[in-house]
Amino acid sequence: MKTNLISYYQESPEGREAEEILRSCVHCGFCTATCPTYQELNDERDGPRGRIYLIKQLLEGGEVTEKTRTHLDRCLTCRSCETTCPSGVQYGRLVDFGRAELEKKLDRPLAEKSLRWTLRNVLPRPALFGFLLKTGQLFRPLLPQAVKTKVPPKRAPISPWPAQHHARIMLALAGCAQPSATPATNVAAARVLDKLGITLVEQSKAGCCGAVSYHLGAHAEGRDYMRRNIDAWWPAIEAGAEALVMTASGCGAMIQEYGHALRNDPVYAEKARRISEMTKDISEILLAEDLSKLDIQAAEEKVAIHCPCTLQHAMQKGDAVEQVLREAGFNLAKTKEKHLCCGSAGTYSILQPELSHTLLNNKIKALTGDNPQKIVTSNVGCQLHLESKAAVPVTHWIELLDQ
């Protein structure tokens, strides 16, 4: 793709990277076949190729309007297009940069700005989010149906965290929503790893991975979260921790980008690179271990696997969960359109509710055609989103192994 970026972008590292990504696109259009929003809306501007042109126009100093923002806002950042692209276009990095630049150039209506500010200041704060969630659960029976479906039900009491300590140490991220919305997930991971001779540790000072701010265009704010986490994890890494184990693939995908996001930071660049290299999804960890030690007695119930976009397209581990569950002897249901997003996509279900709901309905149909008794996934956002519509229980797959 021929480009003619304005000097402001030609002189910045981010702008030069964006130009390199733009030039790698060969206009083939293969990406449109796997883009959920293009499939639903049939508008070139709501597909990766069209959005690439919109970002190119922005960086070349062309006119940007509300329509430009509308089409960029509709992108799920699912990165399914990256898996399809024969030219290796790093679309996710380009759209993050384009959105951040558009935020600087085009002021949003007050209502939109307020909602985005609220999301950036509530979701990344576990204590505040937990308090609001408990309040919502308390009044859930009284809420309108549309709101009620957004509030997950109270969970059963969780099993205790393993008490014994092993020579092998790995780190876990508690995250933002997961401690209060799905509190059994990390405990289940810790109990499974304990049986494999691995101690899983949550560093109390580690917080939000930075994805909420970063994907909403607040890059400086997102990088601040990244630096705080690196500071929290670094002593344990220096002490010999083997890996950062992710039970929420949305966080895993973001943390694997730390090295890139902080590549120009003279203090954190090398630490961030190492953090990204050490970050693994829990499924990837288990595939490297002897699962016979778990002595799993798999139930006969049929289980449907939903692989989040962040695991299959960003982290490139789309088959890992299926491999683990097959090796463990679980009865897996047949599913369709595995590459398409469920519509959760971080804050997308809040910011784009109508399109998100359409994608959710499509995904539920694709997951339940073989009549599973349970749906499992690898990300808290997907779990809560699927749970709001599914007629069968939805859980994190690691809980199957723990049970």
Image (cartoon, grey):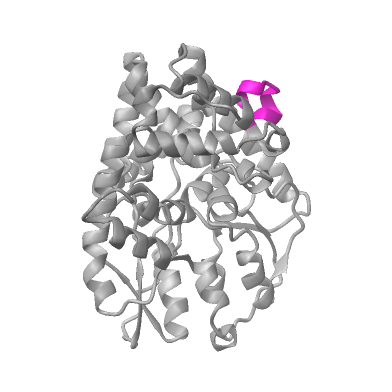
Q: Which residue is painted at 58% across and 86% down in the image?
A: 295
Residue 366 x/y as whole percent: 73, 46
Q: Which residue is painted at 50% across and 17% down in the image?
A: 68
Q: Is residue 359 above or below residue 334?
A: above
Which residues fall within the magenta stretch?
A: 37-47
Q: Is residue 197 above or below residue 171?
A: below
Q: Is residue 165 above or below residue 19?
A: below
Residue 275 location, quadrant: bottom left
Residue 317 x/y as whole percent: 59, 61
> 214 and 361: which one is in front?
214
Give the prevailing secondary structure in the magenta stretch.
Answer: helix
In the image, taking residue 398 as reference, residue 122 lies left or right, namely: left
Confirm whether the magenta stretch covers residue 41. Answer: yes
> 294 and 92: which one is in front?
92
Q: Which residue is painted at 45% across and 28% down in the image?
A: 351
In the image, taking residue 226 as reference, residue 282 lies left or right, namely: right
In the rendered image, is residue 206 in sight? no
Residue 369 x/y as whole percent: 77, 49
In the rendered image, is residue 324 in sight? yes
